[in-house]
Amino acid sequence: MRLDLIKEALSYDIPDEAKEMLILRALAKDENVIPKVLKILEIEREEKATLTKEMNVELSRAHVYIDQHEIKHKIGGADKGFIIDKISKFYIKYKGVISHSFNRFN
């Protein structure tokens, strides 16, 4: 891969679309571009799988808290602050990737 061509394309004072086209042309000159694109897709899928797993953990945590709260903590209650802290850390970790639904109109 000709990283020097990509670096050069990024240095030009041209619109992002033009930079993107120059980068794509540099990649197209690489005979091994297909395996590299497949690796990019593999990494993307791994990241999405991790995100999904972590989101399920946080939703499960919130669900357990809600269930416990509804039965008045009969099975040993979870701390509300702990739940809020964990969910907040999750949103901070994935800032720019996901956001809660109340942000969708901003």
Image (tube, rainbow, N blue to C red):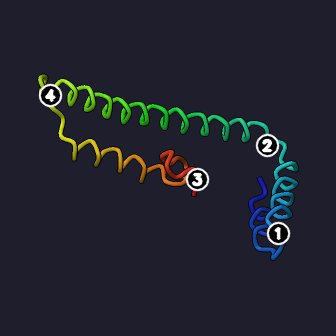
Mark toward the start of the polypeptide (2 vs 4):
2
* Residue depicted at 52% across the width and 52% down the height: 103
Q: What label does residue 72 carry, if any?
A: 4
Q: Which residue is mark 1?
A: 15
Query: Relative to 92, is 5 above or below?
Result: below
Query: Relative to 77, is 93 above or below?
Result: below
Q: What label does residue 74 carry, if any?
A: none
Amino acid carrying mark 3 in the image: Phe
Other residues around mark 2 within 10 Å, as few (<14) / some (14–19) / many (≥20): some
Mark toward the start of the polypeptide (4 vs 1):
1
* Residue depicted at 76% across the width and 73% down the height: 11
Q: What label does residue 33 carry, if any?
A: 2
Using residue 64 as the reference point, say whether residue 28 is left or right of it.
right
Q: What label does residue 105 carry, if any?
A: 3
* Disc nearest the viewer among 1 and 3: 3
Amino acid carrying mark 1 in the image: Pro
Other residues around mark 3 within 10 Å, as few (<14) / some (14–19) / many (≥20): few
Work out how far the residue at label 2 is from the one at label 3, CA to CA, in angstroms: 39 Å
Work out how far the residue at label 1 is from the one at label 3, CA to CA, in angstroms: 28 Å
Amino acid carrying mark 2 in the image: Val
Mark toward the start of the polypeptide (3 vs 4):
4
Amino acid carrying mark 4 in the image: Lys
Determine the secondary structure under disc 2. helix
Determine the secondary structure under disc 4. loop
Work out how far the residue at label 2 is from the one at label 1, CA to CA, in angstroms: 24 Å
Q: Residue furthest bottom?
A: 13
* Residue depicted at 49% across the width and 53% down the height: 95
Task: Please tell me which residue lies in front, 5 or 106.
Answer: 106
Mark toward the start of the polypeptide (2 vs 3):
2
